[in-house]
Image (cartoon, grey):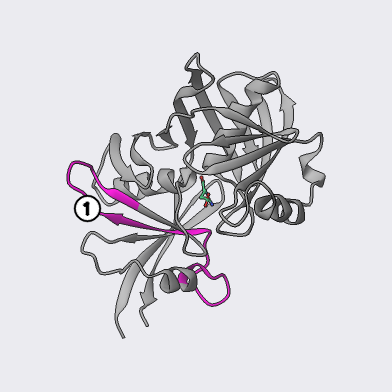
């Protein structure tokens, strides 16, 4: 049986199977991704990330949600950068390719600070907000996010109008102080609550400008603390958007390839 080395990383509890695919040994096979991310029959993860060679960049990050769909992943990008550092591909900073184009990051022993894509607008959906931070995010402010049934409410909004089958991620945000929020996220592609979502907390920190907040914003998630900073572009959008927090290796193992 063929065996392939994998690594497991987590960024504030958003966990990923990570594979160094610079030799192209792992094919982009959705069934295999689902199997490996399954928490009972596989390794178990919110997503799977391949690090691949790409001309003009330090590397390419190929990201899959646990169900095999693809989108931009903020925490996954931070973990991919840490993995690339530990593989010796990059050192203090990097520029790499993602599904949403080129991203850059600064690396310290404690954190990875990711320069996120510009955000074009904050849109209104019913009484709530919608922000695209590379992945789509519905943002709803609640007085007590701890008490929300994130799975039931998130699932209803994710598949409901106007999102339909393509769907959206759903974030429940509690304001806990000046420029300080607590966020719980139902993630599309995982189809459940995750402990943290990087593009999600970024969307929430930006939507906070509609309430009383401003950059930088401290964000508490179920899996740890993140910081989001940004600048207004003066036209309803945001630039110089940064997501910063820890990204850690958990373990290394071997996959039995079927
Ligand atoms: N966990 C991610 C988001 C991954 C993509 C998302 N589930 C989607 O399909 O839109 C993050 O940290 O940003």
User: What residue is pinned by disc 1?
Assistant: 53
User: Tag 1: Cα neighbours inside 10 Å, few (<14), some, or many (≥20)?
Assistant: some
Q: How many marks?
A: 1
Seen from this angle, which residue lies furthest left? Answer: 55
Quadrant where the N terminus lies?
bottom left
Percent position (x, y) of residue 42? 50, 74
Which quadrant of the figure has residue 131? top right
Between 98 and 197, the residue placed more toward the observer is 98
Q: Is residue 157 magenta?
A: no
Q: Is mark 1 within 8 Å of ligand 1?
A: no
Is residue 53 shown in magenta? yes
* 172 to the left or right of 195: right
Q: Which residues are magenta?
A: 36-61
Residue at point 17%, 46% (across, down): 55
Which quadrant holds the C terminus? bottom left
Q: Is residue 138 above or below residue 235?
A: below
Secondary structure under tag 1 reads loop
Residue at the top extreme of this rendering: 234
Side of 46 relative to 221 (left or right):
left
| 255 vs 75: above or below | below
| Residue shown at 61% from the left, 30% from the top | 123
For the point 42% across and 73% down, which residue is it? 32
Give coordinates of residue 57: x percent, y percent: 22, 42
Residue 59, placed above or below residue 4: above
Q: Residue furthest bottom?
A: 1
Residue 179 visible in the snapshot? no
Quarter-of-image position of residue 257: bottom left
Q: Position of residue 222 (x, y in %)?
A: 66, 46
In the figure, residue 146 lies in which quadrant?
top right
**Principal secondary structure, stretch drawn in magenta:** loop
Residue 26 in picture, x, y percent from top left = 30, 68
Is any atom of residue 9 visible in this view?
Answer: yes
């Amino acid at each position: 049986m063929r065996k392939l080395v994998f690594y497991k990383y987590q960024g504030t509890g958003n966990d990923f199977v990570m594979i160094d695919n610079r030799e192209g040994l792992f094919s982009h096979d959705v069934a295999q991704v689902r199997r490996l991310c399954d928490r009972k029959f596989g390794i178990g993860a919110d997503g799977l990330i391949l690090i691949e060679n790409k001309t003009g960049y330090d590397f390419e990050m190929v990201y899959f949600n646990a169900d095999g769909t693809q989108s931009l992943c903020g925490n996954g990008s931070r973990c991919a950068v840490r993995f690339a550092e530990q593989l010796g591909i990059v050192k203090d900073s990097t520029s790499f390719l993602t599904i949403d184009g080129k991203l850059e990051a600064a690396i310290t022993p404690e954190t990875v600070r990711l320069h996120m894509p510009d955000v074009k607008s904050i849109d209104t959906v019913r009484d709530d907000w919608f922000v695209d931070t590379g992945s789509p995010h519905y943002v709803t402010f609640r007085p007590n996010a701890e008490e929300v049934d994130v799975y039931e409410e998130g699932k209803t909004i994710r598949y409901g109008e106007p999102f339909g089958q393509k769907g959206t991620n759903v974030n429940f945000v509690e304001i806990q102080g000046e420029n300080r929020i607590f966020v719980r996220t139902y993630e599309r592609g995982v189809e459940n609550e995750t402990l943290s979502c990087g593009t999600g907390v970024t969307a929430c920190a930006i939507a906070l400008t509609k309430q009383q907040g401003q950059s930088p914003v401290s964000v508490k998630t179920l899996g740890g603390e993140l910081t989001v900073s940004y600048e207004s572009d003066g036209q309803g959008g945001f630039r110089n958007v940064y997501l910063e927090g820890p990204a850690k290796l958990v373990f290394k193992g071997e996959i039995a390839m079927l």
